[in-house]
Image: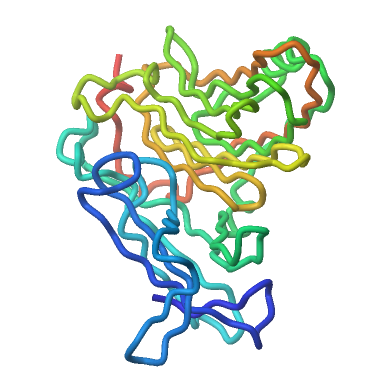
């Protein structure tokens, strides 16, 4: 449980109560709900109707997130989640380790039309890991993809920030693509839904529960779709609309699968803006522990 300011106002606060479910998560297996309300030290009173179910993350792989508050007076509250799911945590194709954490995330409360809601996004300090910048703006997806092939860095740890105009069809990006494998991050304009599809992501056969298309409701209300996507070899963290929605999923692509390709499925042109940076490792050179996915090895 954590006490957070609402809309950045330190004099207007609410408590956030988080409850982990396993099983019972939205996408199967592990997951977490949250409740916004008041707490007097003994009793928590929910601001929302009992029927309102709020999820901290709409992916399959963010569980048991822990808040860190009071690190400095008036500072942000940071959470760090376990990036896995008990449906297959003992089966993922990695060695010599199994399991990892999400990036540190700043959490806050924002007033939205539907009420006070939790928002989250990566800490600003992650920007210090950025390498050479690739930027593009236009309406031709074909031109964008040609530029990505010729000029964008080919890395498996990177950050993408993109905005796309609303479309009646579907827009998105294929990540960690190669050898027939890819993980798709897209927005369905007809259904008003953001999704991550890893059914073609590479190594998926170790568990029948792993291949999945995780979906989050997202009403744009005339706004452009704004995504921040963090990829680190086998991890994909997606934040939409300045943190209103988060989807966290694992993926195990084959060796050499590091291409990025945008797509549209509809009859209207889409305006896109893309910023891409490779992300440097946080490991100190010379003190790196060799870790790998079995799917990474030739």
Q: Position of residue 170 (x, y in %)?
A: 63, 21
Q: Is residue 86 visible?
A: yes
- State the residue at coordinates (36%, 49%): 62
- State the residue at coordinates (57%, 39%): 229
Q: Is residue 96 visible?
A: no
Q: Is residue 164 left or right of residue 67?
A: right
Q: Residue furthest left?
A: 90
- State the residue at coordinates (80%, 16%): 269
Q: Position of residue 192 (x, y in %)?
A: 60, 34
Q: Is residue 239 above or below residue 253?
A: below
Which quadrant: the C terminus?
A: top left
- State the residue at coordinates (72%, 19%): 151
Q: Position of residue 108 (x, y in %)?
A: 58, 67
Name the one closer to the observer, 162 or 157: 162
Q: How many marks?
A: 0
Q: Is residue 79 left or right of residue 126?
A: left
Quarter location, residue 60: top left
Quarter location, residue 173: top right
Q: Position of residue 52 (x, y in %)?
A: 44, 58
Q: Is residue 167 above or below residue 113?
A: above
Q: Is residue 120 above or below residue 154?
A: below
The image's colouring method is rainbow
Q: Is residue 106 left or right of residue 242?
A: left
Which quadrant: the N terminus?
A: bottom left
Name the one closer to the observer, 179 or 130: 179
Q: Is residue 264 above or below residue 103?
A: above
Name the one closer to the observer, 186 or 113: 113
């Amino acid at each position: 449980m954590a006490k957070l300011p609402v809309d950045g106002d330190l004099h207007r606060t609410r408590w956030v109560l988080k409850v982990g479910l396993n099983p019972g998560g939205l996408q199967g297996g592990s997951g977490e709900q949250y409740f916004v309300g008041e707490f007097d030290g003994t009793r928590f009173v929910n601001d929302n109707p009992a029927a309102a179910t709020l999820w901290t993350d709409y992916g399959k792989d963010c569980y048991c997130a822990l808040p860190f508050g009071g690190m400095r007076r008036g500072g942000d509250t940071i959470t760090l989640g376990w990036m896995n799911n008990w449906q297959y945590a003992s089966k993922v194709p990695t060695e010599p380790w199994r399991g990892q954490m999400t990036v540190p995330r700043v959490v806050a409360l924002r007033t939205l039309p539907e009420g006070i809601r939790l928002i989250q996004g990566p800490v600003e300090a992650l920007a210090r890991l950025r390498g050479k910048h690739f930027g593009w703006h236009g309406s031709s997806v074909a031109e964008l993809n040609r530029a990505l092939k010729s000029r964008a860095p080919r890395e498996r740890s990177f950050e993408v920030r993109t905005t796309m105009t609303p479309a009646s069809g579907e827009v998105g990006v294929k990540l960690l693509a190669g050898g027939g494998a890819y993980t798709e991050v897209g927005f369905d304009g007809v259904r008003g839904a953001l999704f991550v599809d890893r059914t073609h992501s590479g190594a998926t056969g170790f568990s029948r529960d792993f291949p999945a298309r995780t979906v989050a409701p997202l009403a744009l209300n005339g706004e452009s779709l704004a995504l921040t996507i963090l990829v680190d070899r086998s991890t994909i963290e997606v934040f939409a609309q300045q943190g209103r929605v988060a989807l966290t999923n694992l993926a195990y692509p084959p060796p050499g699968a590091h291409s990025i390709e945008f797509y549209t499925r509809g009859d209207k042109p889409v305006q896109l803006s893309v910023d891409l940076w490779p992300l440097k490792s946080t490991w100190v050179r010379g003190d790196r522990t060799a870790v790998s996915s079995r799917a990474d090895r030739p």
